[in-house]
Image (spheres, grey):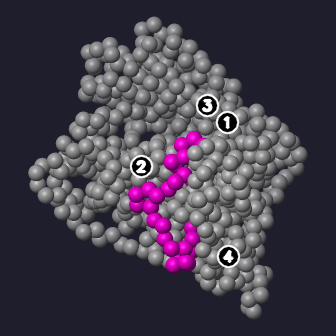
Amino acid sequence: MTAIPPSLFQRLEPLLARVKKPAQYVGGEVNSELKDWDQVQVHWCLAFPDAYEVGQPNQGIAILYEVLNQRDWILAERTYAIWPDLAHLMRQQGLPQFSWEGHRPVAAFDLLAVSLSSELGYTNLLELIDLAGLPLRSRDRGDDHPLVLIGGHVATNPEPITDFIDAAVMGDGEEAVLLVSALVRDWLRSGRRGGRARLLGQLAATGQVYVPSLYDVSYAADGMIQAITPLALPRLTDDGDGPGGAGPDLAPARVRKFTLTDLDAWPYPARPLVPVAETVHERYSVEIFRGCTRGCRFCQAGMITRPVRERSTTAIAQMVDAGLAATGLDEVGLLSLSSADHSEIKPLAKVLADRYQGTKVSLSLPSTRVDAFNVDLAAELARNGRRGGLTFAPEGGTERMRRVINKNVDEADLMATVETAFAQGWRQVKLYFMCGLPTEQDEDVLAIADLAGRVIATGRRAAQSRDVGCTISIGGFVPKPHTPFQWAAQAPAEVVDRRQRALKAKVRADRAFGRAITVRYQDGQPGLVEGLLARGDRRVAQVIEAVWRDGGRFDGWSEFFDFERWSQACQRQLAPWGIDLDWYTTRQRDEAEILPWDHLDVGLDRDWLWQDWLDSQDQASVPDCRWQGCSDCGVCPQLGVHSEVGPFDRPLIPLLPLARPTPLAPLAPTAQARV
Ligand code: SF4
C-alpha cells in the first residue's frame, strides 16, 4: 500500500484569492465521494482536459465516476484543466495538479484516465501531465508513476499523442475501467512484479487496450507510413525475474473497441455531481440510446459508436425520477446522437410531460432531425411552459451536397418542418450547416442564403407575422478517422473563410429577408489544426510538444488559439520528414495508403468505408439499418453485437403526474444487473 497522500488544499487556498473563478477548484459538490485512501486497492484520477465549467457536466466522466466508486475496492476522484492564471501561481509555489475531491496530488494515483473529446485539447493534456509532475513522455515513467490512459472519441486515433500516454481505450468505458482496475489491482498486489512493462503487456494482451509502445511505425521515403508492426509482449519469465520470457509473443495485430450491450443494466449516472460553480449545462442528463446508424458520412461519432443500443423507456423514466431526487436539479436532458430517433420516444415524451406538468421541471430533447415529428416532440416536452430553441441540421445547402454526405433530407422536408414550427408558435429556428465538404463548390454554400430566405418566407406565412427569424450556424468540415471521408482532402482554410464571407455578404444584400437572418461561422484555421491532429500520426507529437512549450494551452478557446504558433511548429518539426501541414490536411488519400489508425478496430469494415466514400461521389445513399435492413458495415459480426432497438418487452410503468395532490407514484424496484 502506498503512503496516504496529503491534501494540498491548505497550500492552494491562499492562491485562490488571486485567480478568476476560484470556486471551480474547491470541490465538495453534492454527490461527490471522498473515500479513505487506505481502504481501497486501486486509485483512479479521472481527468477532463478543459476548464471545470466545460468538463464538469461531461457525461462520460459522470458515468465512470459512479461505476468505479460503487466498487468498495476502488476510489475515483476528478481533475480538470487549471486555468493559466492559477497554473502560473502553482508552478511558482511548486504546487502540483490536484484532484478535486481530496486535493491529493495527481501523481499519487495509480491511474490518470483522461477523457478526450476534442483534438484541440492535446496541449491541455501535456499541461496536465506536466503540472502533475509526471515525465511528459511515457517511456520516461517508472513503476511508481500513474498509468496515463485516454478514452473518448479521439482514442480511435491517438497516434499524435502516443508519446505522452501509456494506453488508450476505445468505445464504451463502463466495462473497460473494471477490466483495467482488476489488472492493476493484481499487479499492485504482486508488488508490481515485472514492472510497468509487464502491466502494459497484460493490458495489451486483452486485445482491447491499445498500448502504443508495443507497436512500431515505420515511414517510407515519400512520407507515407510503410508499416505498423506489433512488437513482442513483455512477459514474466518462469522465475519471475522480469520481462522477456515466453508467451503469446506479439501485441494483437488489431485492437478492438469495447461495446456495451443492455444499457438498462448500467443505469448511470444515478447520482451525478451538482456543480458548485457555473458550468455550461446544469441539468440531469440521461443517455436514452448509444450509437447512430443514420450513416451521415462526415459524422465520426455516428460511425464509431455503432450499433444502436436503446435504453428501455422504463429504465429512462426511473433514471429521470431518481436523478432529479438525488440532485435537486429541475432540468432534464434526454441525450443521444439523435434523440428523436428512439423507437419509443413518443410514449416516453408523453409520460414524462404528464408527470412533470405543473412542476418546475423542464424537459429537453436535443435533436436536430429535420422533420415535423421533431417539432411535435419539442412541443410535447415544452408543456411546462419553458420552450427551448429549435435547431435543425440540413448540413448541406443544396440537395446535391446533402446526397454526397448521406443526409437524406430534401427541401420539402425542411420547409414542412419549419412551417410546423412557426405555426406552433416558435418565432426563431436555427439551422446547422457545414462548409468545406468534399466536392463542395462556392454555389453550394451560397445556396444556404437562398434556403434561409425561403425559411423566412415560409415562417412569415405560417406565423402570419413578419416577426420570425432564422440563425444559420456554419461549422468547418474536418475529415475524421473511421468515416468514409477519412480519405478526403480537407478544404484549405482560405477557401472555407472565403465561402463563409461570401455567404454572409449575400445574406446582407438580401433586402427581402436578410435582416431576419443571422449568420454565425467559425474561422477556418482552428479546423485545419484539428484536421492535422485528427488524421495525424506519431510524427505530429513533436508539433504538439513544440506548441505546448511555446505556451499553447486551451486551443479550443478562440482567445487562446494561435494559428501562427501551430504553423511555425509544423514548419520546424515536420520539415525533416519532408512533409508539412498541408500533407496531413488538404491531401486526398488513396485506398492503398496505410492510415495511422488502421490497426485500431471500431468494427467498421474498411472495404465498406471505401465503397461508401466512392458512393458519396456518386451521390448514392445508404439507408438507416435500424429500419431498412443491414448494409453490411461490419460492426455487428465483427464485434459480436447487434442493434438493440425497442419496442422492449419492459412496459412503461405508470408514472403519475407530480403536480396532483397524490402521493408520489411508486416506481417499480430497479432490477438492473450489477457487475
Ligand atoms: S452490421 Fe448491419 S445492422 Fe450492424 S450496424 Fe452495420 S449496417 Fe447496421
**Residue 589: image location, x then y, percent:** 71, 43
Mark 4 lies on residue: 199
Mark 1 lies on residue: 561
Quadrant where the image shows the C terminus: bottom left
Q: Work out whether mark 2 precedes mark 1 in sequence or the reverse, and give the earlier one.
A: 2
Mark 4 and mark 2 in contact (Cβ < 8 Å)? no
Q: Residue at x 47, y 46 (%)?
A: 277
How far, Cα to Cα, is label 2 from label 1?
29 Å
Choose mark 2 or mark 3, whichever is in front. 2
Mark 2 lies on residue: 336
Q: Residue at x 78, y 42 (%)?
A: 550
The local secondary structure at tag 4 comes to helix
Q: Is mark 4 within 8 Å of ligand 1?
A: no
Mark 3 lies on residue: 436
Amino acid on which disc 3 is placed: Gly
Q: Is residue 213 left or right of residue 667?
A: right
**Residue 59: image location, x then y, percent:** 46, 54
Tell me which segment is drawn in magenta.
Answer: 19-48
